[in-house]
């Protein structure tokens, strides 16, 4: 079994979609290993998204990710990274498959409800960023 990190973003909590998304992840076979309900500081969000530092949307992304609490999930599944990204769908909900979480529910490229690690290497880094 492989592991990955998922984050329900502030829009997911504000729109009261946590239960809907978690139910979908459970239906897709994910096992929840650990969770944290937390408020990201600007410093912690900037370090987490450091790879996007030079992108034009970086400032808005940090403002968004620190605008309310997030729900961080350590998840387990066979091919967990690939499977979670498949279930969530493309970054832009307009391009996401209509059967995916973002395709069904997300509002915009930024307000796209869920973060998912993009590789096994980053999953390992991101899991250790939030969990011991
Ligand atoms: P995520 O996959 O969590 O990682 C980077 C985030 O930056 C992404 O989800 C979006 O929330 C945001 N993002 C990526 N591309 C854009 C964009 N073009 N405009 C605004 N936000 C973006």
Image: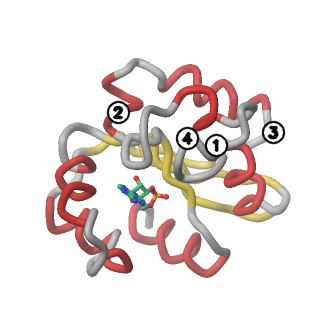
CA gap, disc 1 to disc 2?
21 Å
Would you say 62 lies left or right of 25 here? left
Q: Residues within 10 Å of mark 2 (few under 14, many from 20)?
A: many
The residue pinned by badge 2 equals 11
Residue 96, image quadrant: top right
The residue pinned by badge 3 equals 29
Circle 4 or circle 3, nearest the eye: 4
Numbered label attached to residue 93: 4
CA gap, disc 3 to disc 1?
10 Å
Callout 4 touching callout 2 (CB < 8 Å): no
Residue name at image x 44 percent, y 67 percent: 132
Q: Considering only order in the chain, which callout, 3 or 4, is on the residue closer to the N terminus? A: 3
Indicate if the residue with disc 2 has its beta carbon within 8 Å of ligand 1: no
Circle 1 or circle 4, nearest the eye: 4
Circle 1 or circle 2, nearest the eye: 2
Indicate if the residue with disc 4 has its beta carbon within 8 Å of ligand 1: no
Callout 4 touching callout 3 (CB < 8 Å): no
The residue pinned by badge 1 equals 32
Q: Quadrant of ligand 1?
A: bottom left
Q: Considering only order in the chain, which callout, 2 or 4, is on the residue closer to the N terminus? A: 2
Residue name at image x 75 percent, y 61 percent: 82
Residue 41, image quadrant: bottom left
Callout 1 touching callout 2 (CB < 8 Å): no
Q: Residues within 10 Å of mark 3 (few under 14, many from 20)?
A: some
Indicate if the residue with disc 1 has its beta carbon within 8 Å of ligand 1: no
Residue name at image x 61 percent, y 81 percent: 121
Could you tell me which secondary element the residue under label 4 belongs to? Answer: loop
Callout 2 touching callout 3 (CB < 8 Å): no
Callout 1 touching callout 4 (CB < 8 Å): no
**Percent from the top left, x then y, of residue 36?**
40, 45
**Percent from the top left, x then y, of residue 83?**
77, 53
């Amino acid at each position: 079994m492989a592991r990955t990190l998922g984050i329900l973003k502030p829009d997911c909590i504000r729109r009261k979609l946590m239960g809907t998304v978690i139910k979908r992840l459970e239906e897709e076979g994910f096992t929840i290993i650990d969770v944290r309900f937390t408020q990201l500081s600007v410093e912690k969000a900037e370090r987490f998204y450091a790879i996007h530092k030079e992108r034009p949307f970086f400032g808005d992304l940090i403002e968004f990710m620190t605008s309310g609490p997030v729900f961080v999930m350590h998840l387990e599944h066979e091919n967990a990274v690939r499977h979670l990204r498949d279930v969530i769908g493309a970054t832009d909900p307009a391009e996401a498959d209509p059967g995916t979480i973002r395709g069904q529910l997300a509002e915009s490229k930024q307000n796209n409800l869920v973060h998912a690690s993009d590789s096994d290497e980053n999953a390992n880094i991101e899991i250790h960023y939030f969990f011991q």
